[in-house]
């Protein structure tokens, strides 16, 4: 592990930002707390996707499958078999990890190109949603309704509202920290060489299969855990939301707009775009239906055109110009 | 038993025979030069030895064990390192990042970074650690390939045309590095077109033409060999 990781752990900015975020529920109305909670869900999801999609450069569309397992399956385990949701969280994460490993292995075994990888992962995601909609155990097309959140921590309940916000804040922070940790460890170096040039990566001793699988397993397990927390927050396990490829597209979009492969990029993208989308919908959704999508789309396209590598690199350039001579490169 | 034994390596691509029953030995600690006209099969041969291209027939024994079917990254960890003729670039990583990844083969994170910085200094790329490989000059890219090799602590390096495209003055640095590595006991097999360089460095040479070994011997013997002269200049030349 590079020293930068420990510096991040000891950084007052990090802890300051967390503390400020943590007191938000006391300052903001419940509507904005809800929007921030959603934003944190997507910070966590985009950051977990970033490990595969950003660092290793593998555009996985299978993540709705992992989110779906984490949410629908753990909900079904609780409702149908009475299994505690903490345990459900672990079981779902393990299943997601195994599926992730299988997908990564298939990719390696059949030497899929970038486009084939995208399509194979999309096929996995579609299979997942078909299974969920067709299997009553998982609620079928009508979904599952979780018992009311009474704040019983041992039953994976956080008391809704503020409690859910803090839970999501902790989860989002963990996902971002995992990103920081990976980028400052050998795995980060391996994944970046694999993304840039697989053959050359192998020629300097990188075991492609092992690290592709490692990345996919970590990413899938995190996405699954976030899925479990998300469904607890939503209370209603809606298959059309949780195991639809649309949720993956959103994650990919946030990560790309924020800055692919960077530790804080996907988080930045989600923190800006989720509130923007929600507020536009809240303000315009009833008066001019559809207009919020239009404005949102224009914002996203503009960002991509102005700074194709994401907002984080743009902000860094602006910051460097403002501070004067640039400091040497960062990971 | 030789350190690296290539025996009867054949590689076909469809109907094309790129290598036809090529055999030679490399002794521990020597510098072996491989020469041959363009398209003779030299890079394919390196591809086979380094594990990137499976041979159609034949065997490669490295340090007493057959390495056919062993993946390139495992060979690197066993000390068999290969450089590329076409410099492999990494779009989003600095020179230091790339060499650090190579150094991670044998070292933990922090040591690897120090060792990579040291390797870059050693090849003369000090001060360019934070440039991306794509922005380096051709000479510096070739030096970066050498730094990657050094960083993995190899016992045997396959160098594929590290001098190609360099001026004679620019070859001085890589030559010095290769000589130094060899003095430290690293076995070197090099494919090279730049004759003065390979004549100076190689202790023995193998000549390949149309996928077949046509000669081997010391540089002086090779220069006098009629088959080699024919291969390079055509057999109609009365010179």
Image (tube, coloured by chain):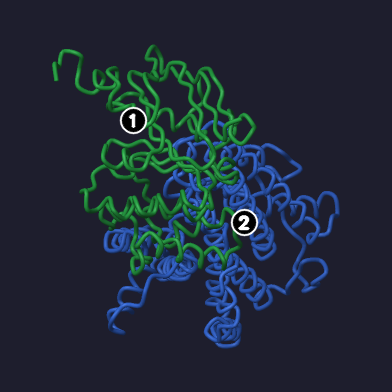
Chain colours: A blue, B green
Q: Residue furthest right?
A: A82
In the rendered image of this protein, does residue A41 appear above or below residue A79?
Answer: below
Element marked by disc 2? helix
Q: Is residue A87 left or right of residue B74?
A: right
Near mark 1 (Cα within 10 A), the count class, few <14, some 14-19 or many ≥20, is many
Q: Nearer the viewer, residue B88 or B118?
A: B118
**For residue A158, which quarter of the picture?**
bottom right
Q: Nearer the viewer, residue A49 or B6?
A: B6
- What residue is drawn where x is 34% and y is 45%? B87
Q: Position of residue A103 (x, y in %)?
A: 60, 40
In the rendered image of this protein, does residue A79 appear above or below residue A32?
Answer: above
Judging by the rendered image, the residue that carries numbered circle 1 is B35
Q: Nearer the viewer, residue A71 or B214?
A: B214
Mark 2–mark 1 Cα distance, whole angstroms, equals 54 Å
User: Mark 1 — on which chain does it sit?
Assistant: B
Judging by the rendered image, the residue that carries numbered circle 2 is A223
Q: Is residue A223 left or right of residue B223?
A: right
């Amino acid at each position: 592990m590079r020293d930068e990781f420990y510096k991040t752990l000891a950084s007052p900015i990090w802890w300051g930002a967390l503390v400020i975020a943590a007191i938000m529920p006391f300052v903001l109305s419940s509507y904005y707390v809800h929007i921030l909670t959603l934003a944190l869900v997507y910070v966590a999801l985009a950051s977990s996707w970033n490990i595969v999609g950003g660092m290793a450069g593998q555009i996985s569309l299978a993540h709705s499958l992992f989110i779906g397992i984490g949410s629908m399956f753990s909900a079904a385990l609780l409702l149908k078999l009475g299994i505690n949701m903490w345990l459900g969280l672990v079981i779902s994460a393990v299943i997601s990890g195994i599926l992730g490993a299988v997908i990564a292995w298939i990719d390696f075994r059949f030497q899929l190109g970038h486009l084939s990888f995208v399509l194979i992962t999309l096929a996995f995601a579609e299979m997942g949603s078909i299974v969920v909609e067709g299997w009553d155990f998982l609620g079928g097309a009508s979904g599952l309704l979780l018992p009311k959140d009474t704040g019983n921590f041992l039953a994976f309940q956080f008391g809704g509202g503020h409690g859910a916000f803090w839970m999501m804040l902790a989860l989002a922070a963990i996902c971002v920290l995992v990103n920081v940790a990976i980028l400052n460890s050998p795995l980060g170096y391996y994944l970046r060489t694999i993304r840039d040039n697989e053959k050359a990566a192998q020629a300097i001793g990188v075991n492609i299969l092992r690290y592709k699988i490692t990345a996919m397993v970590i990413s899938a397990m995190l996405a699954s855990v976030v899925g479990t927390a998300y469904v607890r927050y939503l209370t209603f396990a809606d298959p059309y939301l949780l195991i639809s490829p649309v949720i993956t597209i959103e994650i990919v979009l946030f990560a790309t707009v924020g800055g692919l492969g960077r530790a804080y990029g996907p988080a930045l993208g989600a923190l800006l775009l989720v509130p923007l989308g929600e507020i536009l919908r809240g303000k315009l959704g009833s008066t001019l239906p559809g207009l919020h999508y239009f404005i949102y789309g224009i914002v996203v396209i503009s960002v991509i055109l102005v700074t194709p590598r994401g907002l984080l690199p743009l902000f860094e350039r602006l910051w460097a110009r403002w501070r004067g001579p640039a400091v040497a490169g960062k990971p | 038993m030789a350190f690296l034994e290539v025996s009867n390596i054949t590689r076909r691509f469809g109907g094309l025979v790129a290598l036809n029953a090529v055999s030679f030995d490399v002794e521990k600690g020597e510098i072996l030069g491989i020469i041959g006209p363009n398209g003779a099969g030299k890079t394919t041969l390196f591809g086979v030895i380094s594990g990137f291209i499976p041979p159609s027939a034949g065997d490669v024994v490295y340090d007493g064990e057959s390495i056919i079917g062993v993946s390139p990254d495992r060979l690197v960890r066993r000390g068999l390192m290969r450089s590329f003729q076409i410099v492999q670039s990494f779009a989003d990583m600095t020179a230091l990042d790339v060499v650090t990844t190579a150094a991670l083969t044998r070292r933990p994170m922090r040591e690897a970074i120090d060792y990579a910085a040291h390797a870059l200094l050693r090849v003369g790329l000090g001060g360019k650690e934070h440039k991306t490989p794509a922005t380096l000059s051709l000479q510096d890219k070739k030096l970066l390939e050498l730094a990657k090799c050094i960083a993995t602590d190899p016992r045997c390096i396959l160098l594929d045309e590290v001098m190609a495209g360099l001026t004679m003055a620019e070859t001085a640095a890589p030559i010095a590095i290769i000589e130094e590595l060899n003095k430290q006991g690293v076995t070197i097999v090099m494919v090279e077109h730049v004759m003065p360089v390979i004549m100076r460095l190689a202790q023995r040479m193998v000549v390949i033409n149309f996928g077949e070994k046509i000669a081997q011997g010391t540089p002086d013997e090779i220069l006098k060999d009629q088959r080699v002269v024919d291969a390079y200049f055509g057999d109609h030349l009365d010179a």
